[in-house]
């Protein structure tokens, strides 16, 4: 039986003043005029609440780029939802942080690009690192708990130790270090982002040292491993259509933020169909629920209830078949595709840093 | 040896909220990255974690409400919830230790 969703990822806008080459947003970014209005977002949030969503993540793009953010936060909080603001921090002044806290933000997740200002700004494609440090202070001054989020890749992963130190000094209660997932702009930049095995070892060691140092005190440290280097896939989204849904700036409703890449699935939109119908009845949400859709080797594998056969988007991107076993799995007949990427893009002795294709908004 | 579970007054950590979810008709803890569904005991204990009552006082209140409340069960539950970063045990002797939000950037 299909259970109600717990979480909503509300991608309020694709607009963003940064140009991160690792951004998981799609290459085709929605322009301002295509975004849902305040009333349409309010209605989507209300529908999500009625459906059973108790946690709302306000993200994007840069959610602070929406002038109605305080109203939408207040609406979500009024529904009783937990409100998590996922932000680059650019534009998050002391006043704004206080106002958002008053409207009901429960927690802020602030992303940094690196520990060193010059390197961080190079990755962001904008001079923002100093503003982010101020944003961290603003969050604390507003009395809100802070998670610092850093996406790791070839250009910053060797500084994992420094990044942890900086995040701790900034007052993070939680530090999330996530190896890049290859969707959207990140997929476009994969050749420049994939870390080498040596780099991964450096990061791993830095994380372990920090864990030892902070045992029983200090921030919680979450490290998300580099998927391509694992021999089993990630339990993506805890299973397709099982706990969370994503609403894009234009109202498209997706089982995961990347699911738009699966071109063989129809795309639902909350402006055209009630959210509950989409969650329970749509083809897109039912396509990979449970285990009935699986092919070999997943179909009979004892792991299928734990990892759900991995990521459908990655399976589609690499094999062209969204029902295939995630090629990261060494039991997959397609694992050589991942191995080929690793040898081509991240040879052990490769220390070069190919140029990034910076994220840019297409005019629309 | 005495630890925070003997002397401290547990409170919900910052960013942690208790709620009753009407769709599922159940008590829940909402966390920065996730949700815990609570049974009746856990909900009752967490409802008493106000940062003032000690663990012993929490146990006393529970005993007024329910039969057969065992101190070690309450302690164990709170230790588990502290481990999951739902509550801080608020040991006054160790004040500040598990409160990194007190650290300020140096610039
Ligand atoms: C797409 S961003 C939008 C919010 C805001 N602009 C920011 O970057 O913090 C949402 C979160 O996903 C993270 N993220 C972005 N691209 C990612 C990728 N390719 N893999 C893993 N996490 C990623 C960001 O660091 C951020 O914490
Ligand atoms: S990851 Fe970077 S480019 Fe993408 S939305 Fe966040 S700040 Fe903007
Ligand atoms: S075969 Fe499928 S279910 Fe088994 S471990 Fe690999 S991905 Fe998971």
Image (tube, coloured by chain):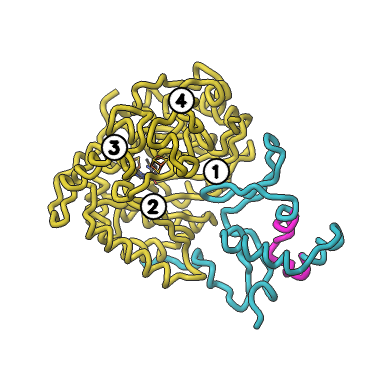
- Local SS, label 1: strand
Say yes or no: labels 2 and 1 on the same chain.
Answer: yes
What is the x, y in percent for residue B45? Answer: 73, 58
Taking the spot 46% from the left edge, 31% from the top edge, the residue there is A255
Looking at the image, residue B18 sits to the left or right of residue A194; the answer is: right
Between disc 4 and disc 1, whose residue precedes? 1
Which residue position is annotated with label 2?
A224
Taking the spot 31% from the left edge, 45% from the top edge, the residue there is A330
Say yes or no: labels 1 and 3 on the same chain.
Answer: yes
Which residue position is annotated with label 3?
A333
Q: Nearer the observer, disc 4 or disc 3?
A: 3
User: The chain coloured yellow carries which letter?
Assistant: A
The N terminus of chain B sits in image quarter: bottom right
> Is residue A58 among what the camera can see?
yes
Q: What's the CA distance linking mark 2 and mark 1?
A: 23 Å
Q: Which residues are magenta?
A: B44-58
> Is residue A66 among what the camera can see?
no
**Dot 3 falls on which chain?**
A
Looking at the image, residue B41 sits to the left or right of residue A198; the answer is: right
**Dot 2 falls on which chain?**
A
Between disc 2 and disc 4, whose residue precedes? 2
User: The chain coloured cyan carries which letter?
Assistant: B
Taking the spot 32% from the left edge, 56% from the top edge, the residue there is A130
Which residue position is annotated with label 4?
A287
Mark 2 C-beta to ligand 1 under 8 Å? yes
The quadrant in which residue A117 appears is bottom left
């Amino acid at each position: 039986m299909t259970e109600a969703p717990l979480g909503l990822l509300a991608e309020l806008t694709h607009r963003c003043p940064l140009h991160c080459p690792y951004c998981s947003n799609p290459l085709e970014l929605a322009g301002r005029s295509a975004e849902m209005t305040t009333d349409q977002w309010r209605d989507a949030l209300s529908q999500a609440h009625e459906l059973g969503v108790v946690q709302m993540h306000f993200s994007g793009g840069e959610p602070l780029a929406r002038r109605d953010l305080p109203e939408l936060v207040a609406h979500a909080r009024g529904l009783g939802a937990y409100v998590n603001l996922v932000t680059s921090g650019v534009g998050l002044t002391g006043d704004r942080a206080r106002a958002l806290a008053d409207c009901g933000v429960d927690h802020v997740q602030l992303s940094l690009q690196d520990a060193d200002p010059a390197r961080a700004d190079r990755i962001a494609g904008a001079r923002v690192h100093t503003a982010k440090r101020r944003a961290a202070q603003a969050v604390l001054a507003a009395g809100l708990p802070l998670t610092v989020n850093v996406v790791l890749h070839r250009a910053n992963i060797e500084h994992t130790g420094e990044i942890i130190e900086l995040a701790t000094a900034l007052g993070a209660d939680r530090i999330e270090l996530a190896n890049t997932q290859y969707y959207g702009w990140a997929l476009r930049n994969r050749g420049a982002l994939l870390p080498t095995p040596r780099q991964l070892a450096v990061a791993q060691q830095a994380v372990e040292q920090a864990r030892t140092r902070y045992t029983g005190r200090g921030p919680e440290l979450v490290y998300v491993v580099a998927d391509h280097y694992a021999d089993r896939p990630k339990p993506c989204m805890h299973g397709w259509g099982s706990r969370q849904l994503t609403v894009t700036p234009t109202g498209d409703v997706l089982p995961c933020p990347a699911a738009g890449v699966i071109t063989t699935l129809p795309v639902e939109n909350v402006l055209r169909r009630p959210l509950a119908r989409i969650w329970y009845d749509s083809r897109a949400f039912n396509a990979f629920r449970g285990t009935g859709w699986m092919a070999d080797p997943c179909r009979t594998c004892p792991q299928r209830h734990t990892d759900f056969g991995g990521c459908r988007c990655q399976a589609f991107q690499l094999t062209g078949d969204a029902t295939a076993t995630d090629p990261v799995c060494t039991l997959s007949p397609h694992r050589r595709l991942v191995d080929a990427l690793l040898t081509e893009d991240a040879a052990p002795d490769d220390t070069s840093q190919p140029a990034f294709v910076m994220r840019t908004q297409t005019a629309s | 040896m005495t630890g925070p579970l003997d002397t401290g007054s547990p409170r919900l950590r910052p960013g942690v909220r208790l709620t009753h979810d009407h769709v599922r008709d159940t008590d829940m803890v909402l966390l920065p990255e996730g949700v815990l569904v609570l049974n009746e005991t856990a909900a009752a204990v967490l409802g008493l974690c106000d940062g003032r009552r000690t663990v012993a006082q929490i146990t006393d209140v529970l005993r007024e409400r329910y039969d057969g409340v065992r101190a070690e069960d309450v302690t164990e539950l709170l230790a588990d919830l502290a481990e999951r970063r739902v509550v801080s045990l608020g040991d006054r002797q160790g004040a500040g230790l598990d409160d990194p939000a007190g650290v300020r950037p140096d610039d």
